[in-house]
Image: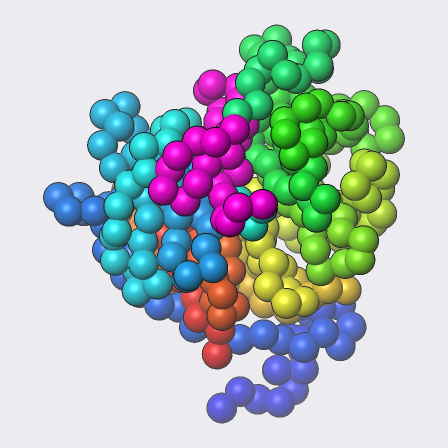
Amino acid sequence: MRHPILSLFTALVLGGTAAAEVAYEFTPDFITPPPGRETIGNGHGEIACDSAGNFYVSVQGPDNVDTGVQVYGPDGKFIKALKLPNSLHGFVIRKDEGGEFIFAAVLLEQKVIKAKLDGTVVMEIPTSAFPEGKAGPKGLKLTNCDVAPNGDIYVVDGYGQSWIFVFDRAGKFKSVFGGPVEPLKLANTHKIFIDRRFEPARILACDRGNNRLLHLDLEGNLISIIASEGLRRPSSASFHGDLMCVAEIAGRVSVWDKEGKQVAELGVNDTQGQTNTPKVTPPDWKQGTVTSPHGITFDNDGNILETEWNLFGRVLRWNRK
């Protein structure tokens, strides 16, 4: 039984004031890799959950075997692989006209795709649709996208110049904001998401290079800095009810309430050389301890799944108590 004074101290540390703790329990060995594999394969992407409770994990690989996006059932057992581009970096699953779709940023091909849950691509925003003059010296390095309530698609050049591009539902360019200039001075804004916990909805930006989490309105104006201290390079986020979970690539998963107070931290890794790297091998993995969190999602019941930047591929799960 936890000491009441210690519990109060922890709540004050996590929330700053009287934020209530949220408890989670680690679930070991949740994912069963595809047949013939000991791990899921090179992970440098995202994880998302559909309305049926299935999980989708993006996996890279030169052989294009079980790469692109792997699909797992609610029990963590492998179902199939979707033959989507294997440099797919960040994606979301969102309802749109006609059902649920995968909206994804394809890193090496410098484009955005919209695909059915069976992997059929139904729309593409090619490199040529992006405005001139916003790409860095190595071209666009698109890392994530999400969809606003009106169907507009927001895309971030997170490995490039951190511009945020807006396209309409049909893929026609509308506007651009952010970037490395005033007033936001974004840097390695790794992923962005539409935060529908608020009305009107707003943008959640994982501004990793500046080690901060930002809320912007849908026109790109700063609403607030949610956090800028104590973070470990935020890389991805997900929402469930009033909560937000964040994957921090330097060795932590954190959970925040709607008021921007931290209410839990999970999997903390303080071992030198084991975070912010894809090279930690399976013998060095510790149950319940992360290495380099890169993608994250809540499932439909509020449990958390996190996928790592790791050459072998790793997915961790925490169930909410």
What span is colored magenta in the figure? 97-123
Vertical placement of residue 202 versus 65, above or below:
below
State whether residue 260 appears in this view: no
Q: Percent x, y for residue 166? A: 71, 30
- Give the residue at the far left of this rendering: 36
Q: Percent x, y for residue 296? A: 50, 51
Q: Percent x, y for residue 150? A: 72, 44
Residue at 60% across / 36% down in the picture?
145
State whether residue 70 appears in this view: yes
Q: Is residue 244 left or right of residue 293?
A: right
Which of 115/166 is in front? 115
Task: Examine the image and state in which quarter residue 137 appears.
Answer: top right
Vertical placement of residue 304 versus 224, above or below:
below
Residue at 78% across / 73% down in the picture?
17
Q: Percent x, y for residue 235? A: 57, 42
**33 drawn magenta:** no
Main secondary structure type of the part rendered in magenta: strand
Q: Is residue 165 left or right of residue 38?
A: right
- Coloured how? rainbow
Residue at 68% across / 24% down in the picture?
172
Which of 38/251 is in front? 38
Residue at 67% across / 82% down in the picture?
8
Q: Is residue 286 left or right of residue 96?
A: left
